[in-house]
Amino acid sequence: MELTTKTIHTATVRGTALTQITLDDDFIVPDVQPDIEHLIADHGNLTITDVRKSPGKAEVNGQIDFQVLYQSPGGRLADPLTDRLQFSERINLEGLEERDYLQVQGEIEDLTIDVINSRKISVKAILLLTLTAEGLTDHHLPVDISDAAAETIREPLEISRLSLRHKDTCRVKDEFDLPASLPTIGQLLWTSGNLRGTELLCGDGRLTLKGELEIFCLYRGEAEHIPIQWVEKTLPIHQTIELPAASQEMIPFGDLRLGSCMIRAEADYDGELRVISTEAVIDLDMRLYESERFSIVTDLYSPERELTPEYHLAELENILTRNSANIKVNGKLNVQTDDRILQIIHAEGRVNIDEQHLTEEGIALEGTLSVRVLLLTADDAVPIRSVTGLLPFSYTIDASGIDSDCLYRIDPSLEFLNAMMLGGNELEIKAAVRADTLVRRQFTCPLIVRVDESPFDEEKIHQMPGLVGVVVQPGDTLWKLAKRFHASVDSIRMMNQLSSDELRVGQRLLIMKQSKL
């Protein structure tokens, strides 16, 4: 007798590790740059440059590229100061094997830049690295047997499996003209790009990336008398990634981050710098899951010989929840200045999840939105200031049925941020945070891996009655009764004129032995 099996591949978590890294270094202002009088804004971008695996250990190399906007003596904004902090960290990860897939997620928890003196700054950063090692496990589902005489019972099995891992980059190139009301660019002083509302959709043979890229530019005009200018623009993103193995039934989930964003001022047809050119690189580290339903053989017997199935406990999973929660975050910031605020220039933020735990309703989150707002003030000596603050939020993600056996992952992102003046020196912040969530429920399932055959104990079979009357007990099924008395489900159904396989406790049945000895 041979089993007909279908092989599936599932991702098994070998181990996880969480480590916090503190970086601290001092940097000298280059000779070509003016002295520092006042820091206005800073920004850092984390890049994982290399990951090396060995049994039980991983080495992660990366860097934080930072830039600092500052004011020089005399109230003039200087060119941004840029440099990088590099790191190399060895992390113990029990269960990691060289052939495993290792995913590394990094976040900048805190970036603090202070002035030591007019020619020197101190840069401190706290990084959080999350490592997850996964290996592929093959499972052979018993979907049929080759013996037509054998009686089998089947049960439905729904599982989710990792169909595809895919790393890729999307390059977004676009440009826009300055509004006619704004003066021509003399020099770009500060630029930033942020992803908003990104969504990855699966289609047959392709992935589609949709979203927006928000661009901000602070610049100096051509003439000295022109005050500092700025422009904001939202660029649409619609990219198609050819992926022959993808299908529209698959569920995508993973990392989608802005790797780099180059913003330049270019000349228009008249030779004036009135065109903003953008080239962004979006890094994707995606997993595509697929849910399937099977009918597997869970037990069997034969009226001709003894069949003994051998089982293996397989670790399987299915997707319990896949959703996107929209979290509203509101709060107020106070600007510590005696000067009148003329206008809000730009606002940006970063989402941090500080705590997450399971509840009866789902996953409870506690987090903060770190906000920075650039302001134009009436102080001619320091016309541009920035104010920062933390806005706390809490939310429970709906994940009914989740328990400690489930694996879950939450990817937060900032969808919307707006700052408004309330009067005096108080700002009102309104924001929306999106939390993409995937919950995978793990369970064990006994799978038949082989069937041993042996002759019946003839004496035992002959001693069994050819016809027996039974009274249905709790837990009895047609299959269990047929196997116990060497009958078939069809014969019991026909002899008792049953219209369904459901039995009632206390129901009386006649069962005729079907053994061919």
Image (cartoon, helix red, strand yellow):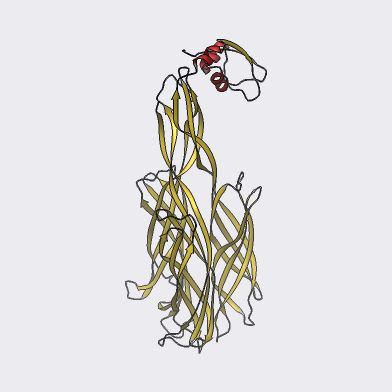
Quarter assignment of residue 343: bottom right
Comparing 134 with 118, the one in front is: 134
The outermost residue toward the bottom is: 74
Residue 137: x %, y % from top left: 44, 45
Q: Is residue 382 above or below residue 481?
A: below
Q: Position of residue 473 (x, y in %)?
A: 65, 21
> Camera-side residue: 20 or 230?
20
Give the vertical position of 98 relative to 508 (above or below). Answer: below
Residue in the image at 58% along x and 68% along y: 370
Nearest to the observer: residue 288 or residue 461: 461
Q: From where the camera sits, is residue 320 visible?
A: no
In the image shown, does 422 or 253 lie closer to the viewer?
A: 253
Question: Is 420 situated left or right of 447 in this image?
Answer: right
The residue that appears at 43% across and 28% down in the rendered structure is 144
Q: Vertically, is 90 above or below 425?
A: above
Q: Position of residue 282 (x, y in %)?
A: 41, 61
Task: Examine the rendering and report whether any part of residue 334 can be seen.
Answer: yes
Q: Quadrant of the N terminus?
A: top left
Q: Position of residue 353 (x, y in %)?
A: 58, 61
